[in-house]
Image (cartoon, rainbow, N blue to C red):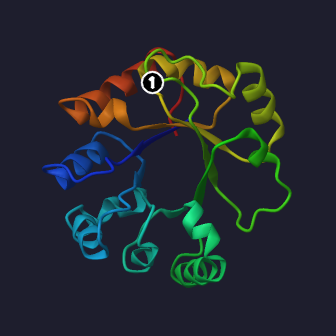
């Protein structure tokens, strides 16, 4: 199962150092999601992270930076998908440098997993919000049966996002998700690295392999 961390949406103190520490602790999939950050500040943040970790980063905005840095991939938002030609051209230019670039996106309902036409081949997709952040119960619109059935039938690798914490790992695995994207349970903790290590330990306790 993929273990993903989504960045804090706002700037935080010593952020590059914390992200680097997460990579050093074993994180392989990091989504840099900061839509309000300028291109320059995003570039500066990437520069502050050791280059040998860049191939673990998926960028949510300022996609052209993927041509300057050896990044893992880019994430397409609704805004990107609306700008069809610009996004298509950006991807083609990135692929000239890195043909293996990972492309991801987000879905908010099960029906999107079965739409016949998707412009891009996604390596995996986020489905959210899956859990209620307070008690890890399913959000309205999702049931365990519908999720299991959809994941079994869809061609997408589906990653659970929204309300996922240490208590949601076992259930997410049982349902069949290809991965889990952690956010609040990392960045709302006093020490994000300790929070990350606690999550890893829970995966190990449950004997769930981390990709």
Quadrant placement of the N terminus: top right
Q: Quadrant of residue 87?
A: bottom right
Residue 105 against residue 142 in the figure, above or below: below
| Vertical arrangement, residue 28 with respect to residue 123, above or below | above
Residue 157, by quadrant, is: top right
Q: Is residue 71 left or right of residue 186?
A: right
Q: Nearer the viewer, residue 143 or 157?
A: 143
Which residue is nearer to you in this view: 46 or 150? 150
Is residue 102 visible from the viewing direction of this image?
A: no
Say which residue label 1 marks.
133
Residue 64 on image: x %, y %: 44, 79
The relative height of residue 150 versus residue 5 in the rendered view (above or below) is: above
Horizontal relation, residue 155 to residue 100: left or right: right
Residue 160, horizontal then vertical, whole percent: 57, 35
SS label for mark 1: loop
Q: Quadrant of residue 50?
A: bottom left
């Amino acid at each position: 199962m993929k273990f993903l961390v989504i960045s804090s949406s706002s700037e935080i103190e010593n952020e590059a150092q914390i992200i680097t520490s997460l990579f050093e602790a074993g994180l392989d999939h990091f989504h840099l999601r900061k839509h309000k950050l300028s291109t320059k500040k995003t570039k500066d943040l990437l520069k502050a992270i050791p280059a040998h970790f860049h191939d673990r980063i998926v960028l949510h905005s300022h996609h052209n930076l993927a041509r300057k840095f050896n990044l893992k991939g880019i994430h397409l938002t609704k805004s990107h998908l609306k700008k069809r030609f610009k996004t298509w051209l950006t991807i083609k230019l990135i692929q000239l440098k890195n043909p293996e670039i990972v492309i991801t996106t987000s879905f908010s309902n099960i029906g999107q997993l079965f739409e016949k036409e998707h412009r891009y081949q996604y390596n995996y997709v986020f489905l959210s919000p899956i859990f209620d952040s307070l008690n890890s119960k399913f959000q309205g619109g999702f049931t365990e049966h519908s999720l299991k059935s959809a994941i079994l039938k869809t061609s997408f690798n589906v990653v659970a996002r929204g309300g996922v914490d240490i208590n949601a790992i076992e259930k997410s695995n049982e349902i069949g998700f290809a991965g889990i994207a952690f956010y609040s349970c990392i960045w709302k903790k006093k020490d994000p690295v300790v929070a990350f290590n606690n999550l890893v330990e829970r995966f190990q306790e449950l004997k769930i392999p981390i990709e």
